[in-house]
Image (cartoon, rainbow, N blue to C red):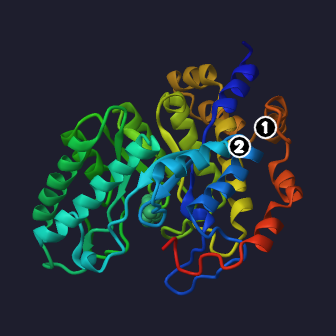
Amino acid sequence: MTELAAVKAALKTQAVETPSWAYGNSGTRFKVFAQAGVPRDPFEKLDDAAKVHEFTGAAPTVALHIPWDRVGDYAALARHAEDRGVRIGAINSNTFQDDDYRLGSICHPDPAVRRKAVDHLLECVDIMDATGSHDLKLWFADGTNYPGQDDIRARQDRLAEGLAEVYERLGDGQRMLLEYKLFEPAFYTTDVPDWGTAYAHCLKLGEKAQVVVDTGHHAPGTNIEFIVATLLREDRLGGFDFNSRFYADDDLMVGAADPFQLFRIMYEVVRGGGFTSDVAFMLDQCHNIEAKIPAIIRSVMNVQEATAKALLVDGTALAAAQGAGDVLEANSVLMDAYNTDVRPLLREVREESGLDPEPMKAYRASGWGEKVVAERVGGEQAGWGA
Ligand code: AOS
Ligand code: ZN
Ligand code: ZN
């Protein structure tokens, strides 16, 4: 197989998971700008997600969020998805929007609150059984706002105890993906603030526990690709929550703020064998001011472009230059790949897959956006997925 044929073959396997909450209304604590035609329930979210997959061919699964996507019959929801050509992916827990969780959830000083949080996580695993999901994605807003508020060590002990109970509940083929975040909504300490904390807990739990790297969850200037390379080397990279940020956890379209960083991340994924393993490439974005479905299509295309560039890195020439200590040549090999316009290649891949080479144009021509505005009167008026 020629190198280009191998790159195309790899790109045809790419799968980016889209988040149900990205299709609904969202905003910041200052304002939610409701958009006409947004889904009114999880079934309609899957209808929209199916359109992203229909036109990109690279978005076959949809992450759910509980309780935002709570329904009476999760098996029926899974069938609804499959009838539209997609599947339900990760189940995201929510221990950050209940009044009881003011001082935390799984790390809360009150054992009754911790019990409530763990029971919610166990419910999410029950839902995984019903939907056939493999991944339980855990992000904890838990933390403190003031020095002395709570005991840092005790909170880690509570976290470990709660995670261990949920870990034991996982069935065959199911994983726990633990996501870290530097800050927000807690402002002094966050109980899972960085990759090291998440990694340490995953090591204690077992091989089903893996780390999720949300690209918006680091201090400015953090070398995220170093974290990715290290977690892959330790076989503990469960997946990504891809998005873009300029300042904090902005949840903008992945690749929109720093396409070079996305390329460097995807290079480490390809270099570390993560492209052909069970690393979950998930989006975690909120399209507060832009049309949602096209924004998600653009995001998938941005991941595809970064991946195509990463796959084009001449590994042999790079290794030779690195081995020779030829700094400029090694950098040049990487930059040659990054500076390659891969859009023609991706257009070929789409055409060979029976897709329109221009997903965004094809979606816009489909009339789906206009259709749902006309039909979905009374879309979610609440805030972020609530
Ligand atoms: C929050 O900032 C985290 O990125 C979460 O991963 C994500 O927003 C959440 O999972 C949605 O429920
Ligand atoms: Zn996230
Ligand atoms: Zn986030």
Q: Looking at mark 1, is its residue's CB closer than 8 Å to ligand 2?
A: no
> How far apart, in angstroms, are the residues tagged by discs 1 and 2?
8 Å
Viewed as shown, does residue 298 lie left or right of 15?
A: right
- Which image quarter: residue 46? bottom right
Compared with 302, 173 (above or below) is above
In terms of secondary structure, where does tag 1 sit?
Answer: helix
Image position, residue 196 (x, y; %): 28, 49
Seen from the viewer's position, the closer of residues 51 and 291 is: 51
Q: Is residue 46 left or right of residue 374?
A: left
Contact (Cβ within 8 Å) of mark 1 with mark 2: yes
The image quadrant that residue 171 belongs to is top left
Furthest residue to the bottom?
A: 30
Residue positioned 72% across, 40% down in the render? 57
Q: Residues within 10 Å of mark 1 (few under 14, many from 20)?
A: many
Q: Amino acid at mark 2?
A: Glu
Left or right of 95? Residue 291 is: right
Taking the spot 52% from the left edge, 29% from the top edge, the residue there is 271
Q: Quadrant of residue 288?
A: bottom right
Extreme residue toward the top, this view? 1
Q: Residue 76's spot in the image, x, y percent?
A: 52, 50
Counting from the top left corner in percent of width and height, residue 137 is at: 39, 51
Q: Earlier in the sequence, mark 1 or mark 2?
A: 2
Query: For mark 1, what is the residue?
Result: 346
Say whether residue 282 is visible: no
What residue do we see at 57% from left, 20% from top?
A: 320
Q: Looking at the rendered structure, which numbered label has been put on residue 208?
A: none
Tell me where residue 174 appears, x and y as whole percent: 36, 38
Q: What residue occupies the far right of the structure in this picture?
A: 365
Circle 2 residue: 305
Nearer to me, 263 or 317: 263
Q: Amino acid at mark 1?
A: Leu
Nearer to us in this view, 321 or 74: 74
